Image (spheres, rainbow, N blue to C red):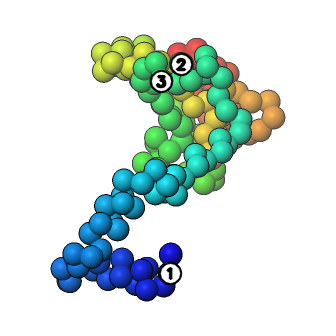
Amino acid sequence: MNQMLVNTVIDAVNPRKPIPTKVVPILLILSFSPLSSLALKIPSPLPILPVPSSPQLQWQLASMAMFLHFGPNTFTDTEWGSGMADPSLFNPTHINASQWVRVAKDAGFSRVILTAKHHDGFCLWPSEYKDYSVRSSPWRDGLETLLQS
C-alpha cells in the first residue's frame, strides 16, 4: 500500500470524522479479503511443559476438591505464617475430621485434600527430621499424625 492510501484509511477510522465515500469500497474489500483474516491470525502459544496427561486432566476437571489448611495459623488467627509460631500452640482438643469430610460431601465436594505440610513448614505428623511438627506439640503427646483423626 502506498502511504497516501494508508493515511486515507487511518483518517477513515477516526470516529470524529465521517468516512469518505471513496474509502468505503477499500474497507469492504479489506474486511472480506481472505488475506486480511490471515494477517490477523495469531498463532496459538506453545504449551508450558510438562503438559498433563489425559487421565490427569480428567481428574482435574472431574469435580470439586476441598483443600484443608490446618496448623498453627489456625490457633494464632493469622493467614500467612512465618514458621516461627511455637509448635505447642497446636493443640486441637475437639477435632473431628469426619465432620470435615461430611460437610465437604454435603457441599458437593468429591475430594478432600489435607495440606500435611504448609508453606510455614509445620508438619501434621511427628517428623523425626524437624522440631516444627506435631511431635513438638502437646496434641496427643506429639505421637499421632492428624491423618489418624
Of callouts 1 and 3, the N-terminal one = 1
Q: Which residue does the numbered mark 1 point to in the structure image? A: 2
Mark 3 neighbour class, 10 Å CA radius: few under 14, some 14 to 19, many 20 or more? few
Residue name at image x 48 percent, y 84 percent: 3
Looking at the picture, which amino acid does disc 2 mark?
Gln
Q: Residue at x 30, y 15 (%)?
A: 106
Residue 72 x/y as whole percent: 54, 42
**Given the image, on which type of amino acid does mark 1 rest?**
Asn
Residue 103 appears left or right of 144: left
Q: Kindly indicate whether the residue at mark 3 contacts the one at mark 1 (C-beta within 8 angstroms).
A: no
* Three-letter amino acid code of the residue under disc 3: Leu
In the image, residue 98 above or below residue 138 = above
Location of residue 27 by image quarter: bottom left
Mark 1 neighbour density, 10 Å: few (under 14) some (14–19) many (20 or more)? few
Q: Is residue 74 left or right of residue 135?
A: left
Q: 57 or 95: nearer the eye? A: 57
- Depth check: 107 or 126 in front? 107
Gap between marks 2 and 1, in whole Å? Answer: 53 Å
Residue 62 in sight here: yes
Quadrant in the rendering for residue 100: top left
Quickly name the residue at label 3. Answer: 61
Can residue 121 be spotted in the picture? Answer: no
Quadrant of the image occupied by residue 46: top right
The number of discs equals 3
The residue located at (57%, 31%) in the rendering is 115
SS at circle 1: loop
Q: Is residue 109 above or below residue 25?
A: above
In this figure, which residue is indicated by the disc labeled 2?
58
Q: CA distance from mark 3 to mark 2?
A: 5 Å
The nearer-to-camera label among 2 and 1 is 1
Expressed as whole percent of the image width and height from the top left, the position of residue 81 reads 55, 51
